[in-house]
Amino acid sequence: MKPCIQFIALMFLLESVSLTAQNISLFEQLNGRYDYTAIGNTLNQGENNAASFCEILDSSSDQLTLLNSQTIVRAYLYWAGSGAADTQVSLNGTAINADLDYSVIFPSSLYGDLPYFSCFSDVTSLVQSTGNDIYTFSDLDISAALANNPGYCGNRTNFAGWSLYVIYEDPTLPLNQLSLFQGLEIINTVQTSLQINLNNINVLDNDGAKIGFLAWEGDANLSINETLTLNNNILSNPPLNPSTNAFNGTNSFSGSINFYNGDLDVYEIENYINIGDTSAQIALTTGADLIIINNVVTVLNSKLPDASVEILSFDVDCESSEVIIEYVVHNSNATDPLPANTPIAIYLSGALIGQSQTTTEIPINGQETHIFTFDLPQNNTIELLIDIQVDDLGNNTGVVNEINEDNNKATVLIEPIAVDQTVILDPLKNCSQNESIIFDLTFQLELTGMSFDSWNSAFYTTLEDAISQINAIASPEFYVPIELPSVIYLRVSKSICYQLFSFELLNDDCPVEIPQGLSPNGDGNNDFLIIEGPHDIKIYNRHGKLIYVGDQNNPWDGTANRGTYTSGERLPVGTYFYVVVLQDSDGQTLRGWIYLNY
């Protein structure tokens, strides 16, 4: 996991993305027994500087021929021309939409700004299903640009063309690193030179090394100060591509010299690149020609492993807080085995908690499974990030030189884990002679059966709050509900594990308390027989005669309002009997005695 080499993976885009004058940069890198070929053709009727015309052909074709041992793994279609991008074309009658389109501008001193474009589309499925065949490209329309801007034809920089790049795998090939760089950059009479830095390459052996280019608008008849160099070495492939006229409308793959205003060329570079190089420098110059670079491909011999890690599963024991993680170390997309004893580091929320290493040499496309066990911090209820890194000494540095240094890590987020479904506890009941009822919610803790001292608890008014651990009840010992009945949720937690409980709060009718003495002497104590709540009451003397009838609004005050006594007459000291009928849901009747004294 050395930081000096980086890897950029190919990203397939669902919609066309427009990019202006994007520098040539790494787009995709394949490692294995890979190579590529390219076909393509112009839509120009001839070279711009040899004829005067301002129309392009409706279509053009080229032949793809692969060996039986060569299996197509990627196929990319490029097309380019004058004006704004035409993002919808056809290949063998199939409609093709651009995944990417680029544009550049030539600032002509005579005609002003002249824009040019290039489009890219992944056509792998189409070419895999078609295979070797004649491929016909059509439906590219730049007629509006040529008609509306006389600068293209007047300046003789009107062009259109296409190319199909095919990357294939062949078991007879050496182990290579194939890197595709793409974008759109321009040189012309205003900007006469261009430097392109190719990074992210790794040269293990320069035997058979090669580099290819796709460029547009080069003219065979314009060769003033025109050079193409790699690491300060002039590239040439005479007679097809002389050193003084690299961009001259040729196709190195087919040997064609009639790829008008386009160049599809490849060069051997084993003498111009050194073992150990991680970058290369391309330079272009021109004195009169307009040249637009679309892509660069390098094929270099490579023998490197590519360590990556994948977390397969994790299991948490909530009682012990033990976590068991199963992970696998891969050596995919590699060109050499991954050595034994490659270090592995395990981090928990950024802190190193363990180290390991591979036990055996992992072959190309092989893997090795590991298990790591550790204990979670106690009293921790937040989510935890587990990070496993292969080729890591425990300080984010590695010891193995790899193809891809940016895929050595795998992470998993352990969020709070519910042990089981919500458990329903018995209701909590309380009563009050006042309007507000106070509940001590902590009484319910005994009902949970959770016996671990380190388990923490909190009460919530909604299930969502309990799951999210927000809006906990601040004082559960003195909780006054807004309404009754209501439901309370209890969350009992340990580390990242938790159990949810629920229970109802109910208003239980308070037992009615009836004093056994009444002293209506006006001192303010026991002057009336007060009974809480709606009720009816009847008072009898010791002979069973009804002497008083009342309710909660007419409590007995030691006088009579029934029988032979005068209404309001004070009754003599003695024992009396009552019958109280409560106006509750049960209609309970209470009987007893009370002693009257003054």
Image (cartoon, helix red, strand yellow):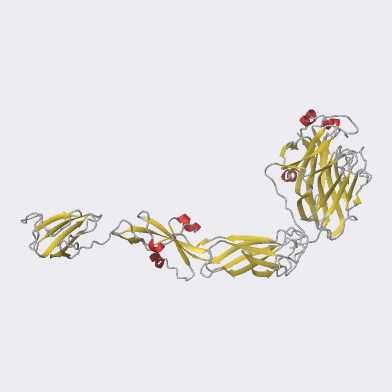
Query: Is residue 107 positioned above or below 75 on the image?
Result: above
Residue closest to the eye, 95 or 268: 268
Q: Position of residue 451 (x, y in %)?
A: 45, 70
Please indicate, yes or no, whether residue 170 appears anywhere in the rendered image. no
Residue occupying image coordinates x 81% and y 52%? 198
Query: Is residue 65 positioned above or below 327 on the image?
Result: above
Residue closest to the eye, 542 or 424: 542
Please indicate, yes or no, whether residue 238 appears anywhere in the rendered image. yes
Task: Say which quadrant the N terminus sits in.
Answer: bottom right
> In the current view of this chain or complex, which residue is farthest to the front?
523
Task: Say which quadrant the C terminus sits in.
Answer: bottom left
- Number of numbered discs overlaid on the protein picture: 0
On the image, which quarter does residue 60 sit in?
Answer: top right
Q: Position of residue 304 (x, y in %)?
A: 78, 61
Q: Position of residue 491 (x, y in %)?
A: 46, 62
On the image, which quarter does residue 508 sit in?
Answer: bottom left
Q: Position of residue 147 (x, y in %)?
A: 79, 28
On the image, which quarter does residue 488 sit in?
Answer: bottom left
Q: Viewed as shown, does residue 534 lie left or right of 208? A: left
Residue closest to the eye, 237 or 519: 519
